[in-house]
């Protein structure tokens, strides 16, 4: 019971503080699960994040469900999912009503534009933290090739991300085992 409450409360805080959606929440989830509660190691988190990113759907809910399940079983998964989704659900219903009334207001538009750079900073900090576990000292070449190849195929060749992710999974299973 204590673990389920901890999962709910930890992911509830992520749901409240994680502005910008799933990618902006990843660093917060790591802080709660790895640094704060020690439910897993940084390496386990990086692996779970990689698998979660390979699957369709929002990353915050996938991480909440998988971490909740690992820590507290099926009820833990439900507790973590409710925790991460409930703040957004309540706030979205309230904000929707407000935005319908004030959507033409320049201050509201400025507020939204002002928050975008902060989300970019959160993503950059997460990338910096994940680099050591993604590029081990003795096996950095293949992940680097995947990184550059993924960027080239998605940005210049316009290959859909799903195909690049599937190819990286297959390549990782073959070359990084």
Image (spheres, rainbow, N blue to C red):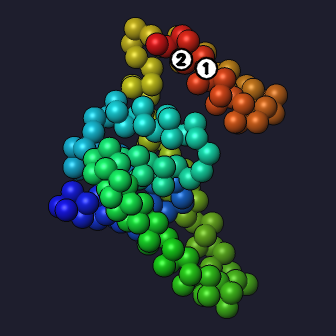
Along the viewing direction, whichever of 71 and 42 lies nearer the viewer: 71
Please tell me how crowded label 2 is: few (under 14), some (14-19), or many (20+) other residues with Cα within 10 Å.
few
Does the image show residue 31?
no
Please identify the residue farthest to the left as the structure is shown. Answer: 2
Which of the 4 quarters of the picture holds residue 8? bottom left
Q: Residue at x 44, y 71 (%)?
A: 86
Please tell me how crowded label 1 is: few (under 14), some (14-19), or many (20+) other residues with Cα within 10 Å.
few
Please identify the residue farthest to the front as the structure is shown. Answer: 74
Image position of 41 with respect to 21: above or below? above
Query: What residue does disc 1 label?
Result: 170
Mark 2 vs 1: CB contact within 8 A: yes
Along the viewing direction, whichever of 162 and 75 lies nearer the viewer: 75
Tag 2's secondary structure?
A: helix
Residue 142 placement (x, y as % from top left): 55, 12
Image position of 16 with respect to 91: above or below? above
Does the image show residue 110?
yes
Which of the 4 quarters of the picture holds residue 109? bottom right
Residue 127 placement (x, y as % from top left): 47, 37
Tag 1's secondary structure?
A: helix
Q: Residue at x 32, y 44 (%)?
A: 70
Residue 140 placement (x, y as % from top left): 47, 13
Q: CA distance from mark 2 to mark 1?
A: 5 Å
Along the viewing direction, whichever of 163 and 68 lies nearer the viewer: 68
Along the viewing direction, whichever of 114 and 6 lies nearer the viewer: 6
Residue 134 placement (x, y as % from top left): 45, 25
Q: Residue at x 45, y 20 (%)?
A: 135
Image position of 22 with respect to 128: above or below? below
Left/right of residue 135 with respect to residue 21 in the rendered view? left
Q: Residue at x 55, y 76 (%)?
A: 92
Quarter of the image with the N terminus is: bottom left
Dot label at residue 15: none
Dot label at residue 173: 2
């Amino acid at each position: 019971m204590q673990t389920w409450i901890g999962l709910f409360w930890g992911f509830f805080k992520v749901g409240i503080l994680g502005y910008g959606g799933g990618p902006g929440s990843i660093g917060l989830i790591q802080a709660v699960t790895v640094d704060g509660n020690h439910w897993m190691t940084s390496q386990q988190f990086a692996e779970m994040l990689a698998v979660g990113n390979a699957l369709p759907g929002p990353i915050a809910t996938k991480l909440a469900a998988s971490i909740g399940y690992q820590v507290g079983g099926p009820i833990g998964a439900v507790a973590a999912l409710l925790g991460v989704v409930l703040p957004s659900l309540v706030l979205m219903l309230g904000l929707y009503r407000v935005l319908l009334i004030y959507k033409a207001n320049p201050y509201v538009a400025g507020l939204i534009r002002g928050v975008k750079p902060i989300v970019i900073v959160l993503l950059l900090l997460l990338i910096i933290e994940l680099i050591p576990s993604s590029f081990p000292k003795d096996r950095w070449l293949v992940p680097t090739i995947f990184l550059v190849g993924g960027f080239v195929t998605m940005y210049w060749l316009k290959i859909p991300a799903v195909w690049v992710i599937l190819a990286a999974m297959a390549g990782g299973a073959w070359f990084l085992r």
